[in-house]
Amino acid sequence: MVGKRKYDDGCAVAHGLDLVGERWMLLVVRDLLLGPKRFTDLRIGMPGISPDVLTQRLRELTQTGIVQRRKLPAPAGSWVYELTEWGMQLETIVIQVGRWASRSPTLRHDAEISTDSLALSLKALFAPHVATGLQAIIALKLGEDQLRIEIADSQFHITRKEPSNPDVIIHTDPNTLAALLHIDLSISQALKANTLTIEGPLHLFEQFLTLFPLPQPAPLTEPN
């Protein structure tokens, strides 16, 4: 078997790419930023990756100290993968890559999107100045995934858990929410199609949708 190619460069950037630059590496990190996941859950979030490749990437990330594997206590008792404390420091990098890539003129906003990808997209695009004065806890239920969003003091926090006493509860799916945010899908159209249910003040959800504006796309350069 051919060994993993490395840059063999003393530059820390090159070494960083040795650690997480292989295909699927950062997407595995992305899908662990909201908390531990089982192997099968990771596969669901990245349908394009084969089981063998995912096994290899998890092995490499574990060997380099970015990911660790542990067994959940009873009654669950299943094995999960999670980021180490050092691995969690990649969150800022992943979010910055997402923010930078959101300016790409070739980014497809109508492509399929997973729950974790959508969650990181919300973090990357959150505009604090638009959220001035807003205090809210939002329960976002995307199929079997439940997310807690707290907006306070122009700060945005999202975690994978069911909140108690939320101000509004949103039942939808990642693709519908992405279309509401960044494509011309209206709330009334989503409600009529039964892909969206809102429990709580409609105006709060309407305000929520304004908090994640897309940046101005980078210009495409003309070929010489």
Image (tube, grey):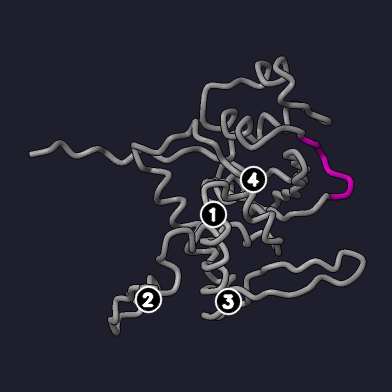
Q: Earlier in the sequence, mark 1 or mark 2?
A: 2
Nearest-to-viewer mark from 3 and 1 = 1
Q: Position of residue 196 (x, y in %)?
A: 73, 26
Which residue in the rendered view is the most extreme toward the left?
A: 224
Establish if 129 lies above or below 74.
Answer: above
Answer yes or no: do the residues labelled 3 and 1 have beta carbons within 8 Å?
no
Q: Which residue is mark 4?
A: 115
Nearest-to-viewer mark from 4 and 1 = 1
Q: Which residue is mark 2?
A: 3
Answer yes or no: do the residues labelled 3 and 2 have beta carbons within 8 Å?
no
Q: Position of residue 36 (x, y in %)?
A: 71, 64
Distance (Cα) linking label 3 and label 2: 17 Å
Considering depth in this image, is 126 or 144 the residue closer to the camera?
A: 144
Distance (Cα) linking label 1 and label 2: 19 Å
Q: Position of residue 95 (x, y in %)?
A: 50, 57
Considering depth in this image, is 29 or 5 the residue closer to the camera?
A: 5
Q: Earlier in the sequence, mark 3 or mark 2?
A: 2
Q: Which residue is mark 1?
A: 50
Name the element at disc 4: helix
Which residue in the rendered view is the most extreme toward the right?
A: 75
What residue is drawn where x is 29% and y is 76%?
7
Q: Earlier in the sequence, mark 3 or mark 1?
A: 1
